[in-house]
Amino acid sequence: MNVETTKSDNITIVTPVVRRLDASVSQKFKESVQEIIRGGETDLLIDFSRVDFIDSSSLGALVSLLKMLNGKGTLALSGMNANLQNLFKLTRMDRIFMTFPTQDEALTKLHNR
C-alpha cells in the first residue's frame, strides 16, 4: 500500500494514499508502518485527511501498531472526517489514541510535550 511519509523534527508523519482503508489494504498499511517503526521511528502521526472510510481490520492494524511501540513512542492520529471520528467514539478508540482535528494541531501538541 502506498503511504507518504514526511518528517517534522522527530515526528514521522504517515499519510495513507487511499480513500478506503479496508480489509483489502489494511495488512499492507500495517506492514508499511511496521517497517517505519523497525527503521527506528517511534513518534508517529498518521494523517487520515485523505481517508473517507476505515473498517475493523484497519482499526485492528492501528492497535497492533500501538502495541508494537510498546509505550516507547507515540502514535497519534489527525485529519479524521466526521464519519471516522464517530467510528472512533463508538468503538472507544478515541480513548486509546491521541486524536487531533488537523495535522498542524497535532504537531503543535506533540512538539510541546
Image (spheres, grey):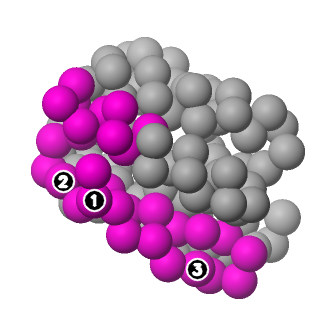
Say what amino acid the circle numbered 3 marks. Answer: Lys
Residue shown at 51% from the left, 50% from the top: 33
What SS does tag 3 mark? strand
Say what amino acid the circle numbered 2 marks. Answer: Val
Q: Earlier in the sequence, mark 1 or mark 2?
A: 1
In the figure, is residue 1 to the left or right of 5?
left
Q: Is residue 64 in the magenta section?
A: no
Q: Is residue 13 in the magenta section?
A: yes
The range drawn in magenta is 1-30
Question: Which quadrant: the C terminus?
Answer: bottom right
Residue shown at 68% from the left, 60% from the top: 39
Whole-angstrom CA distance, mark 1 to mark 3, is 17 Å
Say what amino acid the circle numbered 1 marks. Answer: Asn
**Location of mark 2 (residue):** 18
**Location of mark 1 (residue):** 2
Q: Is residue 77 visible?
A: no
Callout 1 touching callout 2 (CB < 8 Å): yes
